[in-house]
Amino acid sequence: MTSPLIIIRQSFSQIGRNLNMAVASLFSITAILLILGIFFIILVNINNISESIKQNVGEVQVNLKDTTDEALTQQMMAEFAPMEGVENVRFLSKAEAMENFKKKWGANSGLLDKLEVNPLPNAIVVSIPDLEKAGKVVEKAKAMAGTDTVNYAQNTIDKLIRISNYIQIGALILIAALLAISIVVVSNTIKLTVLAREREITIMKYVGATNWFIRGPFLLEGIVIGLISAAVSGGIIALIYHQVVANFGMDFALLMSTGFTSEDFLIKNLIIIYAALGASIGACGSIISMRRFLDT
């Protein structure tokens, strides 16, 4: 038990003696994790939108004007029914559409209860298993007098997939660069501590101290800095995401026909990722800074 306690005391003592550099490393890693967190949130929500829209592939939703009465609605449905490729035609009321929204929102559905008026339109949903024949239905729907807008999922999915691919490629490049930078920052910070103790480390090696006994305090120092950075950045991201959902959740839902990814799901996973990244960055930086002084 003595060695672990000595390692823990030494690591925290080193952080105290080099507080300025430790704080600089903490801010650097925190900033990097914040950027990574923003990209993570964007990617998760894009995938959420894609999955939600994919559930409606094979459907053309014809949103009706507020002035479209029941007689015109029935006439429009009668015109869609005999068209080639059409499997089913059904009416989607405002109330039903809102209920569907609440199911998609899950834990965040309470935000919808604050609405004084249901902003969703009545709609006609046309099921078309053969996507190649959907174009004619879309064209006909746009030409009808009672039509306000037409939602066709396939076009949106294609665009989202392209955007998602570009963002993912860019995010991977950025993540690799940021991780390299953060490791260098931690490495340089701990290297200053190592240089200050170079003579002490040499004596410890001469008297038989193992490499891991010498490396332990520096390794723990890097991990502690990384974990503190993960906790700080995780808290900031959670606060930002909560505010975004609270203030823009309804506008986002109306625009994308689905809500933001659940806060609980996203933040829990992000904290796990942050903890792993923070500890790994700190550990790698420490190991690299010690290579000059240790044989292994």
Image (cartoon, grey):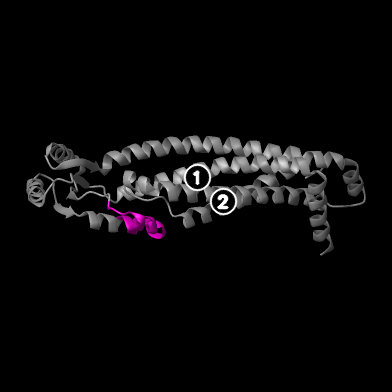
Q: Which residue is mark 1?
A: 40
Q: Would you say residue 9 sits in the magenta stretch?
A: no
Residue 123, given in percent of the width and then of the height, sits at 19, 49
Q: Which residue is mark 2?
A: 273
Residue 246, given in percent of the width and then of the height, sits at 44, 51
**Quadrant where the image shows the N terminus:** bottom right
Residue 227, given in percent of the width and then of the height, sits at 66, 51
Tell me: 118 left or right of 146: right
How crowded is the residue under tag 2: few (<14 C-alpha within 10 Å), some, or many (20+)?
some
Report helix, strand or loop for mark 1: helix
Q: Main secondary structure of the magenta part?
A: helix
Nearer to the camera, 49 or 83: 49
Please tell me in which quadrant of the rendered image residue 115 appears.
bottom left
Please tell me in which quadrant of the rendered image residue 83 appears.
top left
The mark nearer the N terminus, 2 or 1, is 1
Q: Look at the picture and state if 285 lies above or below 107.
A: above
Residue 292 in sight in this render: no
How crowded is the residue under tag 1: few (<14 C-alpha within 10 Å), some, or many (20+)?
some
Report helix, strand or loop for mark 2: helix
Amino acid on which disc 2 is placed: Ile
Question: Farthest front residue?
Answer: 116
Verify CB contact (< 8 Å) between mark 2 and mark 1: yes
Magenta residues, start to end? 101-118
Residue 256 in sight in this render: yes
